[in-house]
Structures are given as structure tokens and as C-alpha cells.
């Protein structure tokens, strides 16, 4: 509620400034101009949105699959932990801005280099909370499973994997926001469609309001994705959100 | 609470009638020296302990004297440095209930059965029956956070019983409960064990709990733990806490504990 009030106040101030200061629309379009662009260019925005949304969605999917595989193998093997963890951290220092054009040169203007970049950026925020949750499983629970004669795999399936699910969802939520940025960066490096591509073309065409509209769509999409994941979390893992009951 | 317990029929049918025994002789266990220069801590030093089939043996001792180590040895979770541990397969029940928060009471109780490869439906059926015997009717679908501490501990006990192990290692099972619930649970456990006998090694720092529940009480010294006294509790069950014989035994045990 307070977020809405704050947002409306900010938009109001922005509108007032844009209208009253006489700043040129190509430098700072008023919110009303952005809204107009949103309506007038809706077909153009929509077709480019579907491109970016699929880059984000598929890229995150790749990141989740690889990230879970990576977290689980590190969890099971001390050797892999020592071998992979430094590489993982190192992968986050790769300057995407430099690598993105290279990937485009290798794989062309299509979907593949975008998926690679989104996945590269989203991978880390998924691996770390998942691994963290796996590592923090109560040692006494593992002991309990051993007294029941459980195999390593049974302990993983019945205890560790469910316990790690909140970590996986936290990671997915973290990666939503960076996925949008990654998709736009990937498109700026070389593309023929997508919201990033649209922004890149809109500025030299003096269609600043359209570029702002594209940004708006992207932010709203990221917020909606985040909410959806939070909803899934509450539905799927109600136990992770309940306060632990105390003595009767 | 006693009146709510019926004979756990399914559990009894499932579990071999032959109860296991536990025998520790002259067991030594030390920990540590992980860092160079730090001395190893001797937890147990020449501890001998026997539990005949169906016997309830309580082990009391000051905090941190290695009681939990003793149970881990019995359960085969760790190996002794010296001496021998000879025990039938044992199930461990800890102070914390260790219920899985994402599983319902029934599925938590059925955990050991599922590990043993029993099908979901059959495992649930047995768990439901036992929870019914434990006065948890209508709570089968509740998740641990919806249950009281005493209820959770009963679910944990059902899970331990359904593991099919005839030796139970109870590690301060009621220490996390408030005093009133703790007494209720002690009476409840006495009743449950009267109906479904098991060989029990009960570790506690609550002398009264030991006297009320056990056939025999073993008193350990501070670390490194040695057996300083063994008291036979020859009082018929059901026992009343106020029984003069029990009160006298409690005083005796406390004296031994204080050294």
C-alpha cells in the first residue's frame, strides 16, 4: 500500500517536472507521454516483449537445471566442491558486456547467445542458496536417517532435497531481476528483436518515450514473475513460512 | 493420558517378539585433537553397561558427561576407541523431535517404514493405527508446526517404534518440554512401554524421570564418564512419584551424582 502511494507521488513529481520545466521530450518524456507510447505502440511492444520474455524464461530454466545439477554434485562430492566452487565464483566476474558480443559472433543473432548470457548471470544466485540450504540440513536428521538404515540417496530424497527447496525458490526469485538485465544486455550486443533491441533503436529515432515504455514493461514483467514465484513458494512450502509452534 | 492408549496392534504384529539386548564393556571414547596442540577430550572412560531384553535402563549423569556419546555407540553411529559394544539394531530418539516440517504427522511416523521400503499406503496404514493408539486421532494430517510439543514427541516416538528396532535409545526425550507436559509424557511412555515392551536405554539428567521409568539406573561421573553407581528400582508398575521407595531411591541417586 505504502509502495503504491510512494510510486504515485514519484510519478506525480516527474510529470510535474516534465510539464513545467520545459525539458525536451526526447531527453525526459513525461509519464503521460510514456503511457501514450505504451498504448500507440502496443503491437510493436508486445511482439518484442514475447521475444525478451522467452529469452528470460528459457534462460532461467537452463540456469535452474544446470544450477541444481551443480549444487547437488557439489553437495555430494567434497572433491567437486573444491574443484567447482572457485570456478563458480570466478564465473560471476566475467564481464558480460565484453563477452556478449563474442557470443553473438560465435552463435549469431538468434536465441542461443541470449540463453547463454541469461543462464550465466542467473546460475550463481540459484546455486548458492540451494547449496547453502543443502549444507544446513540438521546433522541430527542425517544421524536419525542412518539409524533407520537409510542409504545416502534416501536421505537426500526424503530429507535433504525437500529441505533445500526454499533455497531453490529464493535463488529463483533473486535471479528474476538479474534475468531482465541480462536479457537486455544480450540484445544490446546483437539482435534483431526484443525489448532491448527496441530500446537501442528507439533512442536514435528520438522515440525516448517508447524506450521508457519498454523499460516499464520489463520491470512490470519482472515484478509479476517475482510475485508468481513467491506465490508458488507459499503454496508449495507452507511449512517454510509458518512460525514454529512452541510448547502447548 | 494413560487411558487413551490402546494396545498398538499393528506395531506388535510387525515387530519380532524377540527383544534385543545391549552390552557395553569397558568402552572408551575420546574426541577432538582436530587442531594440532589441542588435547583430545575423553568422553567415556571404561564404561560398562548391560540391558537385558525388555529391560529399561536409565543413564543419568551431569550435563556434558558423554551420555549422548554412549547412545551413539549403541546405535552404531560411532565406533569405540577401546572396549566392545554389542547391541541389537537400535533406533535413536532425541530431545528434539526432529520431525520433518513438510511431512504430516502420519508421514513423519511412517518415515522409517518408507526407508525400509514399505509401500506408501501400507506404511500410512500402520502409522495411522499407531497414532490412534497414541491418542492422536484427527491429527494425522496435521503438520508438525500445528502440533503441541507433547504431540510432536508422541509422533516422534511412533516413528521410533515403527522403525521395527527392538532397542530404543532415548536421549533426554522430554527435556525440551515444560514440567507439566514432561510428567504427563513420562507417565505416557511408561504406559506405552508396558503395552509394547522394548529394550530401552534412556539417557537423562532428570533423576526423577530415571527412577520413575527404569528398571535400573546407572549413574555416571562427570567427564570422563565412569559408572559410579548402579541402582535397581525394584518397584512394581504403575509407579507413583510419591511412593516412599521411589523418593528414597531418588535421594540416593542424587547423592551418588553429587559424588
Image (spheres, coloured by chain):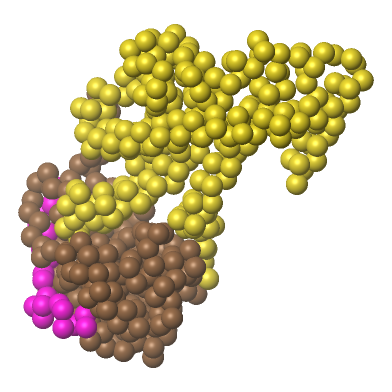
Chain colours: A yellow, B brown
Residue in the picture at 42% in, 85% down: B1
Front in this rendered view, residue B51 or A129: A129
Q: Left of A239 or right of it: where is B20?
A: left
Q: Left of B206 or right of it: where is B76?
A: left
x%, y% of residue B116? 16, 64
Q: Is residue B24 magenta?
A: yes
Q: Does the magenta stretch include residue B18?
A: yes
User: B107 above or below B12?
Assistant: above
Residue in the picture at 41% in, 42% down: A168
Q: How many marks?
A: 0
Residue in the picture at 39% in, 14% down: A104
Front in this rendered view, residue B210 or B249: B210
Residue in the picture at 24% in, 22% down: A83
x%, y% of residue B234? 23, 82
The answer to whether residue B252 is seen in the rendering is no
x%, y% of residue A29? 78, 21
User: B31 above or below B253?
Assistant: above
Q: Give the range drawn in magenta.
A: B10-28
Q: Quadrant of residue A71?
A: top left
The answer to whether residue B107 is seen in the rendering is yes
User: A97 above or below A119?
Assistant: above
Front in this rendered view, residue B146 or B96: B146
x%, y% of residue B181? 47, 74
Q: Left of B162 or right of it: where is A171?
A: right
Q: In which quarter of the image is residue A149?
A: bottom left
Amino acid at each position: 500500500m505504502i509502495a503504491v502511494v510512494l510510486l504515485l507521488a514519484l510519478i506525480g513529481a516527474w510529470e510535474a517536472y516534465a510539464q513545467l520545466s520545459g525539458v525536451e521530450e526526447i531527453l525526459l518524456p513525461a509519464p503521460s507521454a510514456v503511457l501514450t507510447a505504451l498504448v500507440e505502440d502496443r503491437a510493436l511492444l508486445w511482439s518484442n516483449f514475447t521475444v525478451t520474455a522467452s529469452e528470460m524464461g528459457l534462460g532461467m530454466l537452463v540456469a535452474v537445471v544446470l544450477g541444481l545439477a551443480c549444487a547437488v554434485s557439489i553437495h555430494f562430492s567434497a572433491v567437486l566442491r573444491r574443484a567447482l566452487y572457485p570456478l563458480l565464483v570466478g564465473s560471476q566476474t566475467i564481464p558480460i558486456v565484453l563477452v556478449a558480443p563474442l557470443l553473438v559472433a560465435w552463435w549469431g543473432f538468434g536465441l542461443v547467445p541470449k540463453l547463454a548470457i541469461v543462464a550465466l548471470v542467473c546460475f550463481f544466485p540459484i546455486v548458492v542458496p540451494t547449496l547453502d540450504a543443502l549444507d544446513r540440513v540438521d546433522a541430527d536428521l542425517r544421524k536419525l536417517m542412518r539409524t533407520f538404515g537409510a542409504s545416502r540417496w534416501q536421505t537426500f530424497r526424503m530429507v535433504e532435497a525437500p529441505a533445500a527447496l526454499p533455497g531453490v525458490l529464493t535463488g529463483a526469485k533473486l535471479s528474476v531481476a538479474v534475468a531482465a538485465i541480462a536479457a537486455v544486455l544480450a540484445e544490446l550486443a546483437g539482435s534483431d528483436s526484443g525489448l532491448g533491441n527496441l530500446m537501442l533503436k528507439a533512442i536514435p529515432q528520438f522515440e525516448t518515450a517508447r524506450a521508457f515504455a519498454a523499460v516499464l514493461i520489463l520491470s512490470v514483467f519482472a515484478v509479476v514473475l517475482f510475485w508468481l514465484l513467491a506465490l508458488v513458494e507459499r503454496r508449495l512450502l507452507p511449512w517454510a513460512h509458518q512460525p514454529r509452534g512452541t510448547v502447548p | 493420558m494413560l487411558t487413551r492408549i490402546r494396545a498398538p496392534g499393528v506395531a506388535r504384529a510387525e515387530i519380532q517378539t524377540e527383544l534385543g539386548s545391549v552390552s557395553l564393556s569397558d568402552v572408551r571414547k575420546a574426541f577432538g585433537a582436530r587442531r594440532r596442540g589441542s588435547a583430545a577430550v575423553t568422553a567415556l572412560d571404561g564404561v560398562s553397561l548391560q540391558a537385558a531384553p525388555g529391560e529399561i535402563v536409565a543413564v543419568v549423569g551431569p550435563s556434558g558427561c558423554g551420555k549422548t556419546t554412549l547412545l551413539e555407540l549403541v546405535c552404531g553411529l560411532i565406533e569405540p576407541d577401546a572396549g566392545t559394544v554389542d547391541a541389537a539394531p537400535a533406533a535413536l530418539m532425541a530431545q528434539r523431535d526432529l520431525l520433518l516440517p513438510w511431512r504430516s504427522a502420519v508421514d513423519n511416523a511412517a518415515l522409517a517404514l518408507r526407508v525400509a521400503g514399505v509401500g506408501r499406503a501400507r506404511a500410512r496404514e500402520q502409522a495411522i493405527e499407531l497414532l490412534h493408539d497414541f491418542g492422536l486421532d484427527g491429527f494425522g494430517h496435521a503438520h508438525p508446526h500445528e502440533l503441541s510439543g507433547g504431540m510432536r514427541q508422541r509422533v516422534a516416538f511412533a516413528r521410533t517404534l515403527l522403525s521395527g528396532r527392538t532397542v530404543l535409545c532415548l536421549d533426554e526425550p522430554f527435556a525440551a518440554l515444560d514440567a507439566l507436559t514432561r510428567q504427563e509424557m513420562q507417565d505416557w511412555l511408561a504406559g506405552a512401554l508396558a503395552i509394547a515392551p522394548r529394550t530401552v536405554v534412556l539417557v537423562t539428567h532428570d533423576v526423577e524421570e530415571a527412577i520413575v521409568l527404569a528398571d535400573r539406573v546407572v549413574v555416571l561421573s562427570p567427564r570422563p564418564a565412569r559408572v559410579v553407581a548402579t541402582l535397581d528400582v525394584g518397584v512394581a508398575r504403575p509407579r507413583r512419584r510419591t511412593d516412599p521407595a521411589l523418593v528414597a531411591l531418588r535421594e540416593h541417586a542424587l547423592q551418588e551424582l553429587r559424588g
